[in-house]
Image (tube, grey):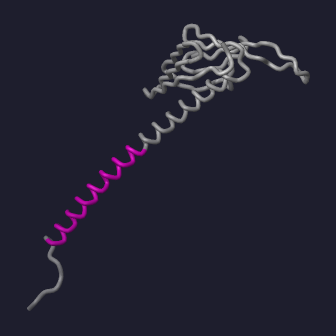
Amino acid sequence: MIKKGFTLIEITIVMALMFLMLGVIDGMLISYVKIYKSSVSQNKGFNYLNDAIFIIEKEVNQNVTQVKIEKNIIKIDYYKKIGKINSKEISKKDIKLVNTNLYIIYGGEAIKAESAIIDDVKDFFVVKSGKNIYIKIIWYNGQIIERCLVIENAN
């Protein structure tokens, strides 16, 4: 008499192979998720750092009369409009690292949260040579951005 069906050993072997395949697929999925999270974090950091450089470049070139560098602080003299009349006065602003945040500080005012360019900065380096400014920002996760900016309107 011919019996139809599977033996207990055959079912056990098939289940073991399925669990083995699921383990491999699970390991691949976990590895993919880790790589994805790392990639998103790096891209986010790169975007934040690029935005910071863009803001610094705008501040260095907008209505500026003079740009000086002293101890990794960018000191900017700029024209400020007064009232509705087109008269201008020269004001000052600094771009500097305070604790771990990079700020724009207008005319010696107190530091305000809205004047922060980027948070969690490990280090900030600035060097000026002629009309060029070399900027290096090191972020908390070790990402580094380096740029050379041209001062368009100032000395």
**Residue 149 % position (x, y):** 57, 23
Image position of 2 with respect to 46: above or below: below
Percent from the top left, x then y, of residue 59?
A: 67, 23
- Quarter of the picture containing the N terminus is bottom left
Residue furthest to the left? 1
Left or right, residue 138 beside residue 73: left
Q: Is residue 135 shown above or below 2?
A: above
Q: Judge from the rendering whether residue 135 lies leftward or rightward of residue 10; answer left or right.
A: right
Name the residue located 57 percent from the left edge and 13 percent from the top edge: 130
- Residue nearer the viewer, 154 or 43: 154
User: Where residue 124 sits in the image (x, y, percent)?
Assistant: 52, 18
Residue 82 showing in the rendered view: yes
Could you tell me residue 89's position as x and y percent? Answer: 82, 13
When asked about the image quadrant of residue 35, the answer is top left
On the image, which quarter does residue 13 sit in?
bottom left
Q: Is residue 16 magenta?
A: yes
Does residue 24 show up magenta in the picture?
A: yes
Camera-side residue of 20 and 35: 35
Residue at the far bottom in the pictured view: 1
Please state the extent of the stretch shown in magenta in the rendering.
10-36
**Does the image show residue 109?**
no
Please count the marks in the image: 0
Question: Which secondary structure type mostly characterizes the magenta part of the structure?
Answer: helix
| Left or right of residue 75, residue 91 in this image | right
Please, which residue is most extreme toward the top here? 70
Q: Residue at 53% of width from left, 23% of height from top?
A: 148
Instruction: Name which residue lies at 87% across and 17% down.
Output: 87
Q: Quadrant of the C terminus?
A: top right
Q: Nearer the viewer, residue 33 or 73?
A: 73
Residue shown at 55% from the left, 13% from the top: 128
Quarter of image, res 60: top right
